[in-house]
Amino acid sequence: MAQKETMTVNMGPQHPSTHGVLRLVIELDGEIIDKITPHIGYLHRGIEKLSEHRTYHQVLPLTDRMDYLAPMHNNLGYVLAVEKLLGVEVPERAKTVRVITAELTRLKSHLVWLACHALDIGAMTVFIYAFREREKIMQLYEKISGARMTSNYYRVGGLSRDVYDGFERDVQEIVDTFPGHFDTYEGLLTKNTIWLQRTIGNGVISAEDAIDAGITGPALRGSGVDWDLRRDNPYSGYEKYSFKVPVGEKCDTFDRYKVRLVEMREAVKIIAQALKDLKPGPVLADLPQVCYPPKENVYNSIEGLIHHFKIASEGFAVPEGEVYQGVENPKGELGYYIVSDGGNKPYRMRVRPPSFVNLSAIEKMAKGAMIADLVAVIGTLDIVLGEIDR
Amino acid sequence: MAENNRAVVKLRERFAADIVDIKEFRGEVTVTVKKENIVAICDYLKTALAFNMLTDVTAVDYLGQEPRFLVVYNMYSIPNKDRLRIKAQVGESSCSIDTVSKVWSTADWLEREVFDLFGITFNNHPDLRRILMTEDWVGHPLRKDYPLQGPDREPYKGRLS
């Protein structure tokens, strides 16, 4: 009788297709994957612990360092959770600008996913094209917030400042040109034989298994579950916009690819609707005990300066209680669970990381596949290690 | 009101002896329970009340109070599109609770994280190892008595302390 022996292969943490510092220990039977043991935590910075020692305003810059490909969504979930704790209402204009920038962030994140996923499977052209388009959004980010990645643009109660002059024109240009770019990507991939052979039937996970494993976002919709937090539990005014929620049928990598591409087109439609909806008005709630005063008051009056100093040094007190706020991050459901003891710092802040939970299903998706297909499975899960490790 | 919540009504009928507290804050319902029947409660919530997705498992450390820890289960029902939060009391002296990873497999990694960062043991867990910290790490960083700077360093005297 032939003796069966497995071989152990180490992949990562320094590996181009693990999208960061993910280490996988794989047990192989020939070329077939028998077992995968992921090792994470290389990027652990203790963001949850740090936030217990900072005021609510000081926690905000920590949040966009988690999923650094979608920083505005991280900020959005956090400010919504704190606003829920406080029970405050945000001005309409701030809500609309939040929706526009959040959907731009979705495009930005999905473009990186498409670029890296395609590059991993061998389609280099798409990588170059997608990064060219991403640069447009990065430049817009820089104009809005001063930073290309760590935006830190939202504030509890609204926005840090109004958008710049010409914002509408720049966004309109993206709305007009991006659908054509998506056609280009689809032209390069959707009927490409190599792409089809690498993605169809790869990483199959049934809807039941996906829900059981806690998978959320496009990866869950690719398995045919019609669920989107923006539509089903709307926040920040998403109920005003109409958009389709794409779902897959075959639960494989190709269906998840199609879902994400339709999502990008829908994001552009949401941006177009929100842009029409954008009316002049205040971008910060009238809450002197929470929000920073306008800069002209700080520079020109002693009261304004003291006001600024009080909020910067002491922060604001938040009523005792606990809330959970989930938002539809490009990767899945990003949730903030904040417990307040009535003080000016969170007693406990928990981040529900979508990539962490999605990654835990990797063994279910890749077991029995060839080792080369594991790269496609990692790509289709669209993970960000900054958020997994926090 | 929390009394009319569909899950609260059913839980009151079935598990009256286990319920410690029911609260509503900002429209979110939280049910605090004793830890002994947590698997039965979660199984009932999943099968009978369609809370098919376990969104999150985490813990909160109330240092100086008894019970010291609360293990928090945030769950979501995709058919009904509503949320429920269950909190289970875990004392410091018997710092363990049964695993719910047989009910939702999501709990596997999430409970490992709670074990790693809070030191709460999950009985019958299939693979209870540290997940974010290294295997040989001493202590549990998210406990309130664990210093922010780490164990062997002078506390920072600046604005954070």
Image: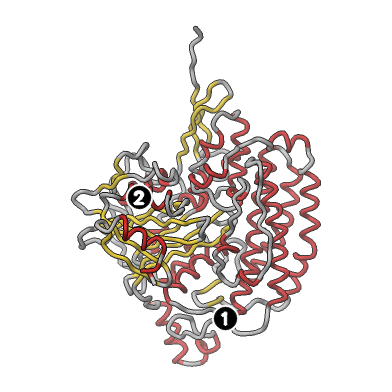
Q: Quadrant of residue A365?
A: top right
Q: Amino acid at mark 1?
A: Pro
Residue B105 or residue A143, whichever sits in front:
B105
Dot 1 and dot 2 residues touching (CB under 8 Å)? no
- Residue B52, given in percent of the width and then of the height, sits at 47, 51
Q: Which residue is mark 2?
A: B114
Indicate how the structure is coloured in the image.
secondary structure
- Residue A21, given in percent of the width and then of the height, sits at 51, 43
- Mark number, residue A91: 1
Residue extending farthest to the top is A1
Q: Amino acid at mark 2?
A: Val
- Residue A26, given in percent of the width and then of the height, sits at 50, 30
Residue located at (33% from left, 68% from top):
B23
Residue A12 or residue A205, whichever sits in front:
A205
Residue located at (39% from left, 78% from top):
A316
Image-based side of A367 in relation to A197, left or right:
left
Circle 1 — which element?
A: loop
Residue located at (44% from left, 91% from top):
A303
Residue located at (43% from left, 50% from top):
A44
